[in-house]
Amino acid sequence: MADGVFSIGIIGAGGISAAHIGAAKASDGRVRVAAVADPSAANREKAAAETGAAAYESAEAMIAAHSSGATPLGGVVICTPPSIRVKLVKAALKAKLPVLSEKPLAHTLSDAKKLAALAAKHPRTPAFVAYCHRFAPAVLVMRKLVESGRVGRLVRFENAFACDLPGHKDKWFSDPRAAGGGAFLDMGSHSLDLFRFLIGPAKTLGAVFSHAWKKRTETAATVLVRGGKKNGTRIPAGVAGTILSGWAESSRFTLSLVGDGGTLFYDYEKPEEIIFKDLLGKAESMPVENHGVRFTRQIVAFADAVQRKAKTNLATFEDGLAAAALNDKAARLAE
């Protein structure tokens, strides 16, 4: 596809699709939503009205319209529940449509393996997972500061993504059959991918899950991971990672990178500063761009990867499979 406006189709016009629609609108014309597909007439008509996109009752109808030339697309963004993604990704890749799939890649390790295999079968058609925190400016700045030696040798990764989401109690998100997991699969998958992005591959060492809602998925998780091989001069083998995920607790969205020469701390609720604290406790505030740009940066990176074959920070399906394997081990350790 030639460089220029990148036309996407959105499959699944529920809650998270709004973030991708907003990202396209904020891309200064780089990306446009050309089609939406959802079995819910209300959802697809609302999304179509917001974007001027063609509306389809199913992904199959959207892909058929693309293939016939009625609604040509550069790629699709899949925003459905993870339990139904295999057939959707298979159909898109068969039609040579690049894919950006919402996280987690799948609701089970088995399906994640199937999806990674599908991506490998279609190497010329890009397929990515929407781990948007890879595009948060603070994350990228912290990564560079670690590489520069600002915190010395890295010792620990600490990440908490938690808040109170009582509405999830009666939705598919906490249905074990539909979701496959709860707070850790949902929020913790971001944390697992951040560890991989910032530090490298990991192993799950321990996990404790809590269940506030009877017969539903976990509402809280405390998980310990450990990094693998040395990654450069500043990231030794065996870096520890502590991950806290929650759906029924006070809001906390924080990331700390602790080294033997200091600590970097970012609070998503104070989105325009990173705090560096040295070993004597002296704190320095460093300005940073608001993380609100992460979805737009991600959708533009998708366009660049497809149209320009650019190297980006987008997570691959192999990255998604790695997070799924860590999640699966945590769930088994927590039993």
Image (tube, helix red, strand yellow):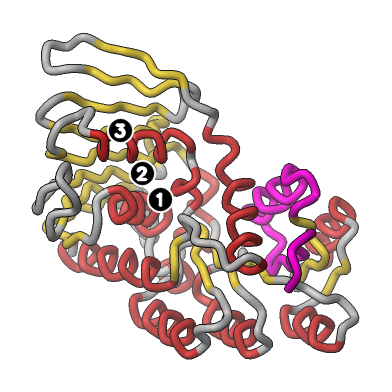
Q: Quarter of the image for the N terminus: give it.
A: bottom right
Question: Residues under labels 1 and 2: Cα distance?
Answer: 8 Å
- Residue 128, relative to residue 15: is it above or below? below
Residue 140 found in image quarter: top left
Badge number at residue 187: 1
Magenta stretch bounds: 1-30
Badge number at residue 312: none
Badge number at residue 246: 2
Q: Earlier in the sequence, mark 1 or mark 3?
A: 3
Mark 2 or 3, closer to the camera: 3
Q: Earlier in the sequence, mark 2 or mark 3?
A: 3
Give percent across and percent down for residue 5: 79, 59
Is 102 or 329 nearer to us in this picture?
A: 102
Badge number at residue 145: 3
Give percent across and percent down for residue 231: 19, 53
Q: Earlier in the sequence, mark 1 or mark 2?
A: 1
Question: Residues under labels 1 and 3: Cα distance?
Answer: 25 Å
Q: Residue at x 80, y 81 (%)?
A: 66
Give the SS element for disc 1.
Answer: helix
Residue 262 shown in magenta: no
Residue 145 found in image quarter: top left
Q: Quarter of the image for the C terminus: give it.
A: bottom left
Residue 166 visible in the displayed image: yes
Residue 2 shown in magenta: yes
Q: Is residue 5 left or right of residue 273?
A: right
Give the SS element for disc 3.
Answer: helix
Is 218 or 322 nearer to us in this picture?
A: 322
Q: Is residue 273 left or right of residue 239?
A: right
- Residue 238, relative to residue 8: is it above or below? above
- Residue 35, relative to residue 131: is it above or below? below
Q: Residue at x 48, y 61 (%)?
A: 103
| Amino acid tagged 3 | Leu
